[in-house]
Amino acid sequence: MPEPTDLSDADERVLRHLDGSSADYPALVAANTGLHIPLVERRLATLSERGFVEAVTDEQIFRITERGRRALAGKPGAAAAADATPTREAAAPDGGSPVDTD
């Protein structure tokens, strides 16, 4: 039986949108999910704290993390605090693989 991930409907909508796109601004996440911008901003902050999304740049462009994908799929261990601390990555200038900015 899968472990509950404690994702709200808004969390799932945000994660599903980001899972289908490479990265997006909170306002565009809101526009594409039908949620209000302040709600999306609060949910992104919470999802970021939980390691389910990460800011790609200082401009607050977010993308889903592998941990967020596991939570969305309802897989065990996704919400566990014991998971490794997420790293902050930025997209490569050529649009290729992400590069670590730490």
Image (cartoon, helix red, strand yellow):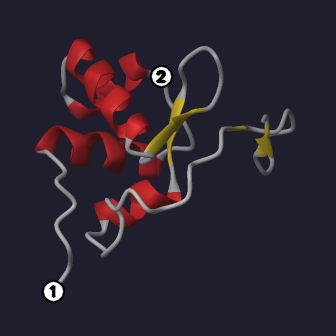
Image spot of residue 47 (x, y percent) = 35, 39
In the picture provided, is 37 more to the left or to the right than 85?
left
Residue 23 to residue 73: above or below: above
Residue at (81% x, 44% y) in the render: 99
Quadrant of the frame with the C terminus:
top right
Q: Amino acid at mark 2?
A: Tyr
> Which residue occupies 78% across, 51% down?
97
Q: Is residue 45 left or right of residue 62?
A: left
Which circle's residue, 1 or 2, is located before the other in the chain? 1
Mark 1 vs mark 2: in front:
1
Q: Residues within 10 Å of mark 1 (few under 14, many from 20)?
A: few
Q: Using the rendered view, name the quadrant where residue 50 is placed.
A: top left
Residue behind mark 1: 1
Towards the viewer: 29 or 64: 64
Which residue is situated farthest in the front direction here? 82
66 versus 25 height, above or below: below
Q: How many marks?
A: 2
Name above or below for residue 2 compared with residue 80. below
Kind of residue at disc 1: Met
Give the distance between the C-alpha atoms of the residues marked 1 and 2, in whole angstroms: 35 Å
Quarter of the picture holding the N terminus? bottom left
Quadrant of res 73: bottom left
Name the residue at the right extreme: 94
- Give the SS element for disc 1: loop
Which residue sits at x=19%, y=50%? 7
Side (left or right) of 74 relative to 61: left
Q: At 38% from the left edge and 56% from the top edge, which residue is drawn?
A: 81
Where residue 55 appears, as percent x and y from the top left, is: 55, 30
Q: Kindly identify which numbered label has been placed on residue 25.
A: 2
Position of residue 64 measured from the top left corner of the image (x, y, whole percent) = 47, 47
Residue 102 horizontal side relative to residue 83, left or right: right
